[in-house]
Amino acid sequence: MKVIYNYDLYSQYERTTNRLIDEGLEAYQLYKDNLSIINRVAFCYYYVDDYFDALDYVLKAHNLLKVSKNTNEYYYTLKLSGDIYRKLGISKTSITYYMDALKYLGSEDAKRKRCDILRRISSVYTDTRTLDLATDYAVEALQLAELLHDDRLIADANLSLCRVNSFRKLFDKSLKFGLKALEVYRQINETKGLVLSYLELASIYAYQNDFDLSKNFYEKALMLATNIDYTSGIIFANYLLGRLLYKKGNVERALFILEEALAQSRRLNFNSHKVKLYYLLSDLYAEMGDYELAYNAYKTGAELKEHLSSDRNKERIYQLQNEYNLFVKEKQLKQYMEDNVFLEKKNRQLNEEVQSDALTNLLNRRGLRRAINNLGFDGSHKIILCDIDDFKHVNDEFGHPCGDVLLKEISRLFKDNSKSNYRIARWGGEEFLIVLPSSTIETAIEYGMNLLKRIEARIFKYKDKEFSVTMTFGVAPLIGDFETSIHLVDQRLYEGKRNGKNQVVYE
């Protein structure tokens, strides 16, 4: 039977016990050149937060002399390497391994693997607050997931976009993506995804001071995490719930919840959770007037944080990495001439893929950024951000394939009615961004109105069904910098949505 990519291949290790680790180590002693067994041991250590031992075994996997780097297993080795370095806070190395994973997708379910890696890259950029890139990769992951009609990947990508928009403080957008993720996770009965969705949404509601709804969502996350014995989720839910209760002034209840979460983190040695809990408990103890406890909690948290990022730990990481690099260098040099032609071809292919949208053949976010790289932000160029009104209803009534056909038809309509120097990109699920170089605001408004009328008058067909749609357009100048311009045009688009849709907003 063929081993193909699926979401459950290593899911057994998410509840890793010492027995699973011991079994893996026994098997490794017998079959030290078996990549699957090495991956198994590495995954076991990873899921108990023992990242250094996990790193030791993934580097053993990389060092295997007989590894065929086109195998399904090597993809998992690379993906886990990226996951481990992300947990260790070494973001550049994490991105490097994820990028390598994109080169070794193999022939089985390559698009699904690619989509999963794009989402993970987005998560690293979100962690480092490189939010433009985080958004680009998450949007690309969502577009690919929708093209594949893979509900699990669609939910994961929506959750990534929820998180990155929350950091941007674009809470309306964040809620839209978070609620979509929640809806899809419910449909596919993915409990861990539901836990993570509830936690993200609860945090957004807390930022918006809707404490009752926030508390309700934290409690739902906690209940579900408890049902599936998702320990990290339980601890994090208790941390966030305790923080919320503390903000509301319920100090005693917050103290009880946080101290229980800390005790559990200590038992399981979840260091990243412990740091957050010590710092929050320090604030809470100070609020209660117990300054000795507050000082000790803060000191313990600071020492633990320093330990996690200490030079000694970093030296161990880089020592392991250097051993791996020295070991494989001869193999790399030996294979270089053979692989060079293949890699150049692959790089050209990947370069094309990462700049265009697979469904519509329009530019994607990165492709658009590159296309307008030389344009100035002096107001002489204009942008239009537009969105299909009530696109969800089309998918719900006629199905996702119909939605895909609609996106393709609108893309063709845009291309057929645009000047040759206009740059058109699929910006999000049903969003399009158009750049009009050296144009007046009047020209941009007229162009937007022309597209609006053509779409409004068009009858779209799918199989034996006919339907019509409208679109809302926001118009703005390229001014200040790219992020400022996008924020401005996004505000105008949402103003049009709030005021009835099917309109062009330019002020």
Image: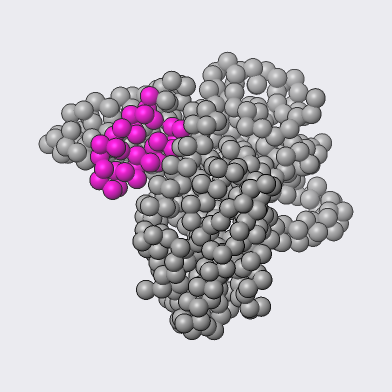
Q: Nearer the viewer, residue 197 or 134?
A: 197
* Dominant secondary structure, magenta: helix
Q: Nearer the viewer, residue 226 or 264?
A: 226
Q: Is any atom of residue 319 visible in this view?
A: no
Q: Residue furthest right?
A: 338
Dividing the image into 4 quarters, which one contains the C terminus? bottom left
Residue 219: which quarter of the image?
top left
The magenta region covers 194-223
Q: Residue 360: x and y, percent?
A: 66, 58
Q: Residue at x 42, y 60 (%)?
A: 501
Q: Residue 256: x and y, percent?
A: 24, 26
Residue 148: which quarter of the image?
top right
Q: Residue at x 65, y 21 (%)?
A: 24
Decide: is 48 above or below 321.
above
Q: Is any atom of residue 245 visible in this view?
A: yes
Dividing the image into 4 quarters, which one contains the N terminus? top right
Q: Nearer the viewer, residue 274 or 197?
A: 197
Relative side of 309 to 322, left or right: left
Q: Nearer the viewer, residue 193 or 341?
A: 193
Residue 68: which quarter of the image?
top right
Instruction: Give the number of callouts.
Output: 0
Decide: is 250 above or below 145.
above
Q: Does residue 212 show up magenta in the picture?
A: yes
Q: Residue 302: x and y, percent?
A: 33, 42
Q: Residue at x 42, y 26 (%)?
A: 225
Q: Does residue 87 show up magenta in the picture?
A: no
